Amino acid sequence: MPEPTATPPLLGDFAVEIRSKNAGPFWVTLETFMKDGTGYTIAADDTYLNERVIAGLYKVDPAQVRIFRIPALNVVKISFPRPVAQASLRDRDIHAGQHHVPLATLPVPQRHLSV
Amino acid sequence: MPPSRDTATRVGVLTPAGMLGAGFTPESVERGLALGPDVIAIDGGSTDSGPYYLGAGLPKTTAAAVRRDLRILLKAAARADIPLVVGSCGTSGTDSGVDWVAGLAEDVMAEEGLDLRIARVYSEQDTAVLKEHLDAGRIHPLAPHGPLSPETLESCTHVVGMMGHEPLADALRAGAQVVLAGRATDTALAAVVPLMRGMPAGPAWHAAKIVECGGQATTDPRLGGVFATIDHDGFVIEPLDPDNVCTPLSVAAHMLYETADPHRMREPAGTLDVTDATYTALDHRRVRVEGSRFEPADQHTIKLEGARVTGYQTVSFTGIRDPHITAHIEEWATGLRAVLTDRVRQTLALNDDDYGLDIRLYGHNAVLDDIEPDPTPPREVGVMLVVNAPAQSTATAIAKVANPLMLHLPLPDMPYLPSLAFATSPAETERGAAYEFVLNHAVDVDDPAALFRTEHSHPREATHA
């Protein structure tokens, strides 16, 4: 079990990297590269991380959120249509490169910490 | 190059960097040449930096950087007698972008005493022709977009079609040694020669996807590009730099990069499916990939990209360090918006919907806005005002009305006027036209090359090649 660096522990504490980026002009994609199988178990837990949770974090329609769980890479990948048009007046992140932060700072539930 | 050498048992693809103009070392290209490449393939652009480059028809890269990279690659291609294929020239792949890169290439060739046959493959689209396709029901929206209106097509300053490998293959068969393409899929540049030499489509497209961002598929992308060797059963990927490493994880993870779906990727001719691909370390720095599939599409499609002007922008930027204001920064920003819109109404006789403005609080929530998870008070705040209006003069007039407020606006409980920290004088910067992408649609075509036009620099020689 990796050592958490914050209280309560955050998803990012169990990851090598959590990143975000445009996937073309109309989609954002987020990837959690988890440190190990334990981290992957947390990120892949669909009662912790699911379409509804992502929709809440990013203010998007849960029906348009796509989640890919990839155990071979210890990665959970999440994609959804860009909520703000790229380079429009309201867009403050042209490459969507900083949109990983709400996901990375999501608190990890207690049930995953008492191993 | 001999493109008809279709009895190849392996085809090598040298990709020195993820983008022409991004830079790479001449030594890394030398190492790539020693591995026996059949083509040098490099991407020249992307939509990633926004609609401005397509809308304005201008490149993101500077000419000196593109010329520098072209010099190394043109000399390498000439020496090895292999083609150089560049896609999405000039960032967005407009016709002006292709001509810009071609002009730089011709300058370099004249200086270096090279005489390579160049093909320019243009991808810009005539909206009148596209309207005929639309009327005939051949244009379909891609998620999350809806149906296309003719007015939207007409509003674009530039529209490009994203070519697959077919127009590039035609140019090579006609004798081109350097192919400078307009908008092309990132993968088409690297896939074209392997496909022409008879390599199976699964490994050819998958290898092309892995090399398209240069060193992204390695453990240290700072160390430069990669080399892919495609054969009849799969492909091998390795970094150009001897100190760099490809691992099964670094290669497999690259399928995730800038894609919405990590398993399937649509090309004009079909879909690459890597669901069952296996990644095996051959040694400490090379990875072999097998099991990639390509499903030919029933209908060949060309994706369209188009951008239009949304208005003209002026920005202004001031800094706040006063702890009382930063502690109540949301209230201050709400006050700025209210007083500003009121004054604009009074002094410029403009209604709120005649223009747009965005107040971005850097240091507080400017980057993530309403999804910002951290509510702690900031130490300092940079206030960026962005104004968008139908005319540049209107945008600047609004920013000038904002100027005394961005200098002196107090909170309601402050008995004095603060003086805030403007970053520049004058405070207003005119940004010119702002653009948006409005097309996310695909055209059904019978001929994969029909929407593209190719010009050869040595047309008579090309016909004898």
Image: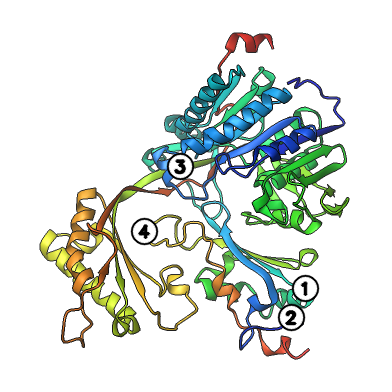
Select label 1 or label 3 by which is in front: 1
Are the residues at dot 2 and dot 1 in contact (C-beta closer than 8 Å)? Answer: yes
The amino acid beneath tag 3 is: Gly
Amino acid type indicated by mark 4: Leu
Distance Cα–Cα, label 4 vs label 2: 41 Å
- Give me the chain letter of mark 3: B
Q: Quadrant of residue B399?
A: bottom left
Residue lying at 56% horizontally and 49% vertically, measured from the top left:
B142
Residue A38, by quadrant, is bottom right
Q: Circle 1: is it few (<14), some (14-19), or many (20+) Cα within 10 Å?
A: some
Residue type at mark 2 is Pro
Q: Quadrant of the C terminus of chain A?
A: bottom right
Residue kind at label 1, given as amino acid type: Asp
**Left or right position of B125 against B415:** right
* Residue receiving disc 2: A2
> Mark 1 — residue?
A36
Q: Which class describes the residues within 10 Å of circle 3: few (<14), some (14-19), or many (20+)?
A: many
Q: Provide the residue designation for mark 3.
A: B306
Asked if residue B279 is positioned above or below residue B109 in the image, the reply reads below
- Subunit bearing disc 4: A
Q: Are marks 1 and 3 in contact (CB under 8 Å)?
A: no
Crowd class of label 4 (few under 14; some 14 to 19; many from 20; radius 10 Å):
many
